Image: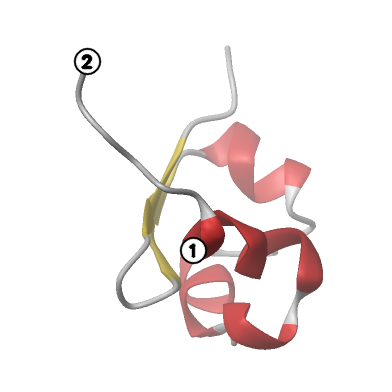
């Protein structure tokens, strides 16, 4: 399987992750990952700095 997760860029937080993603992010359960403060984690907060554009 492949690690997959959904990150809300505007709120700077995870909103969903599969089991492989939980292992990748070293989270014991989904609630633990969703409760993390992504603004304080450099490896996650960088997502919000991307300038997303279509096309």
> Is 5 above or below relative to 54?
below
- Which sits earlier in the primary sequence, circle 2 or circle 1? 1
42 and 3: which is toward the camera: 42
* Quadrant where the N terminus is found in the figure: top right
Rendered-image quadrant of the C terminus = top left
Residue at screen point 61% across, 84% down? 39
Along the horizontal axis of the image, is 46 left or right of 30?
A: right
At x 63% / y 69%, what residue is drawn?
45
**Which one is in front, 16 or 54?**
54
Please give the label number shown on residue 55.
2
Residue 22, disc: none
Whether 22 is drawn above or below 37: the answer is above
- Dot 2 lies on which element? loop
Residue at the (37%, 62%) spot, across then down = 9
Instruction: Examine the image and state in which quarter residue 33 appears.
Output: bottom right
Q: Marks 2/1: CA distance?
A: 19 Å
Q: Is residue 2 above or below residue 46?
A: above
* Residue 44 image point, x, y percent: 66, 63
Front in this rendered view, residue 51 or 26: 51
The secondary structure type at the circle numbered 1 is helix
Which is nearer the eye, 46 or 5?
46
Question: Relative to 32, is 48 above or below?
Answer: above
Q: Give coordinates of residue 6: x percent, y percent.
A: 37, 47
The residue labelled by disc 1 is 48
Badge 1 crowding class, 10 Å Cα cut-off, few under 14, some 14 to 19, many 20 or more, is some
Residue 38 in the image: x percent, y percent?
Answer: 60, 77
């Amino acid at each position: 399987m492949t690690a997959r997760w959904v990150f809300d860029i505007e709120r700077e937080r995870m909103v969903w992750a599969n089991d492989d993603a939980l292992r990748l992010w070293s989270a014991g359960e989904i609630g633990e990952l969703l409760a993390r403060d992504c603004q304080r984690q450099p490896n996650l907060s960088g997502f919000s700095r991307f300038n997303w554009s279509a096309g």
